């Protein structure tokens, strides 16, 4: 197998060849779903996205002069859900072109994505990290206690683990059970996908993980690889990198028709107010935050746009504020246009709440979803303050005025008040799910209690309608709206908030209040869980 490629910039094509026959496309990084919609923010964010990668692959599939595409994987950092979406893109490209994935580093996510190509190749010196599926959570309860800090953790139900790593010093049985089941679901999906792609049995794929394959030649023997070869052994004189063929690719044709589909992204922790981004890596505080004001404004803009015939809500969120989640949910419920919800890597707790009343719900087999439950709590610094010589003094008109003060633990009356509040939120949550998913309250409660599900298991129990990705969601939205499959899409943002660029407005709006303080939280923010 030799792929014609020009190894030196400026080399001429072989005599008689007027256009390249192969294109080399580099794939690396985390591959987020979308690029920033603000032009200034997009300029500073040069990270490739699934959206931009999909556009490139679509152009290549339409190039009549092109014979094949070499997908050259670099430092691939995408999660399994994103890898699965890229795999689907490569499979679509493979229907029109010959495709080869080149993998110097072979791990579960990279191999999953690369398997969408017809052939998978790695060099003899390729690094392999095809170990089994596992998870690790670091519990901070004993560490905090050592420093005089306790943590109040009030939750419904026993699987609701957003705050347990702060309040406990070990993994409880409920968390161990749901983590084991989540890993089992991920492994089942991975084994099925790789077995189909590589033409082997699922048992053989599981054996790859058990063996801990460490060499390219062994990987070739087992069917993981199509061939062992270095890049220079694949390259020949009639191919060019992506940048060199831009002028040869067909320009994007303006799509005109009866309507379009609006895409509303909801990414990050769900909070009240405006969307913002806190760049500090602080648990429960840092990262991208989806503000209910911003998301609601975007949905309303899509509702009011006369050319928009359907809406796709893309959710990649572990939840957050119960209030913010409910406000977003209300906009989806009252929408008269078809709404399709698509889950990213995580759509759990509040991230699931917001989409319960979508007309159609889609998830990746590798999505983490569910977590139907409620949690609230606070750090208790009473002993810490004593050690450090801090003396908080209280003046309050009512006994519960400083209920969320970290100076002391909840009193019995305060704890009863908080527990009553989260019980009300939980009943509302399971009611929303029951109505939207057409299940009984008892059924939802049995699926809830804070438990997370893989996308495949969520399909089996009725929490979603279909396995797929954003491409699938756009197709379903067009079907529901009676649009053609090539009807255009547009990404909806809130109306312009002012003269500052989007990223500057987000920086100005940074908040340091955890979503579980002064508000009941719908969280699956177990950032301590590391799936491997």
Image (cartoon, helix red, strand yellow):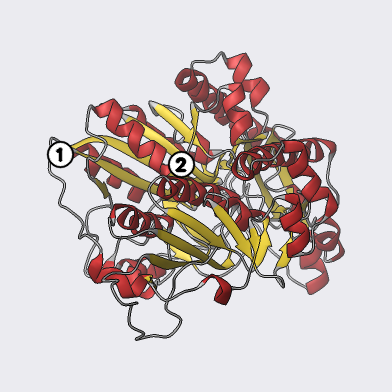
Q: Position of residue 440 (x, y in %)?
A: 56, 13
Residue 504: where, in percent of width, then height?
35, 71
Q: Nearer the viewer, residue 484 or 393?
A: 484
Residue 126 visible to the viewer? yes
- Left or right: residue 29 versus residue 124 is left
Residue 43 found in image quarter:
bottom left
- Asked whether the viewer can see residue 335, the reply is no
Q: How many marks?
A: 2
Q: Earlier in the sequence, mark 1 or mark 2?
A: 1
Q: Quadrant of the N terminus?
A: bottom right
Locate residue 478, reporting x and y percent. Answer: 28, 33
Q: In the displayed structure, would residue 79 be above or below residue 356?
A: below
Q: Is residue 434 above or below residue 249?
A: above
Does dot 1 land on a helix, a strand or a loop?
Answer: loop
| Of marks 1 and 2, the one in the foreground | 2
The residues tagged by marks 1 and 2 sit, at their Cα atoms, a distance apart of: 24 Å
Question: How many C-alpha atoms fall within 10 Å of the one at disc 2: few (<14), some, or many (≥20)?
Answer: many
Question: Helix or strand or loop: what does disc 2 sit on?
Answer: loop
Front position in the image: 367 or 282: 367
Question: Can you give x and y, in whole percent of width and height, for residue 115 in the image?
Answer: 57, 50
Q: Within the image, what quadrant is residue 38 found in? A: bottom left
Q: Are marks 1 and 2 in contact (CB under 8 Å)?
A: no
The image's mark for residue 469 is 2
| Rendered residue at 73%/64% (across/down) | 216
The answer to whether residue 92 is left or right of residue 129 is left
How crowded pointer 1 is (Cα within 10 Å; few <14, some 14-19, many 20+) is rated as some
Closer-to-camera residue (159/123):
123
Residue 146 higher or lower than 297, as above or below: below
Residue for badge 1? 307
Residue beneath the point at 72% across and 37% down: 202
Quadrant for the C terminus, please.
Answer: bottom right
Q: Quadrant of residue 55?
A: bottom left
């Amino acid at each position: 197998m030799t792929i014609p490629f020009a190894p030196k910039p400026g080399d001429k094509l072989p005599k008689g060849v007027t256009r390249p026959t192969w294109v080399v496309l580099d794939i690396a990084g985390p591959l987020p779903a979308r690029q920033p919609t603000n032009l200034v923010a997009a300029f500073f964010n040069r990270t490739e996205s699934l959206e931009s990668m999909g556009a490139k692959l679509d152009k290549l599939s339409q190039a009549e002069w092109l014979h094949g595409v070499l997908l050259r994987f670099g430092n691939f950092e995408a999660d399994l859900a994103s890898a699965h979406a890229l795999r689907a893109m490569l499979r679509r490209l493979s229907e029109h072109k010959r495709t080869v994935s080149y993998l110097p580093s072979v791990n579960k996510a990279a191999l999953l994505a690369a398997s969408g190509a017809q052939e998978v190749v790695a060099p003899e010196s390729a690094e392999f990290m095809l170990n089994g599926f596992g998870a690790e959570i670091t519990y901070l309860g004993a560490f905090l206690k050592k420093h005089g800090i306790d943590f109040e953790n009030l939750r419904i139900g026993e699987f609701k683990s957003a705050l347990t790593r702060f309040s406990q010093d070990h993994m409880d049985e409920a968390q161990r059970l749901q983590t084991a089941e989540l890993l089992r679901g991920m492994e089942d999906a991975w084994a099925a996908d790789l077995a189909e792609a590589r033409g082997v049995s699922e048992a053989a794929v599981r054996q790859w993980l058990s063996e801990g394959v460490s060499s390219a030649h062994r990987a070739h023997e087992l069917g993981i690889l199509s061939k062992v070869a270095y890049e220079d052994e694949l390259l020949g004189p009639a191919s060019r990198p992506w940048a060199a063929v831009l002028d040869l690719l067909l320009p994007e044709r303006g799509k005109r028709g009866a309507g379009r589909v609006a895409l509303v992204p909801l990414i990050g922790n769900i909070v009240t107010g405006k969307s913002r981004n806190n760049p500090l890596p602080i648990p429960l505080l840092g990262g991208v935050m989806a503000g209910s004001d911003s998301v609601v404004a975007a949905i309303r803009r899509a509702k009011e746009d006369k050319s928009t015939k359907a809406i796709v809500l893309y959710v990649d969120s572990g939840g957050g504020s119960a209030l913010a989640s409910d406000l977003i949910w209300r906009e989806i419920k009252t929408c008269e246009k078809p709404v399709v919800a698509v889950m990213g890597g995580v759509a759990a707790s509040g991230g699931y709440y917001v989409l319960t009343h979508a007309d159609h719900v889609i998830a990746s087999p590798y999505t983490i979803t569910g977590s139907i439950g409620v949690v609230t709590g606070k750090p208790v610094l009473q002993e810490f303050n004593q050690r450090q010589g801090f003396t908080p003094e209280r003046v309050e008109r009512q006994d519960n005025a400083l209920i969320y003060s970290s100076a002391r633990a909840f009193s019995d009356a305060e704890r009863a008040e908080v527990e009553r509040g989260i019980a009300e939120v939980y009943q509302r949550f399971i009611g929303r799910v029951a109505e939207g998913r057409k299940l009984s309250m008892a059924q939802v409660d049995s699926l809830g209690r804070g438990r997370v599900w893989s996308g495949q298991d969520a399909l089996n129990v009725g929490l979603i309608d279909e396995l797929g990705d954003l491409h699938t969601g756009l197709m379903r939205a067009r079907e529901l709206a009676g649009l053609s499959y090539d009807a255009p899409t547009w990404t909806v943002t809130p109306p312009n908030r002012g003269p500052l660029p989007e990223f500057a407005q987000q920086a100005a709006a940074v908040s340091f209040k955890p979503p579980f303080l002064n508000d009941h939280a719908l969280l699956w923010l177990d950032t301590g869980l590391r799936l491997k």
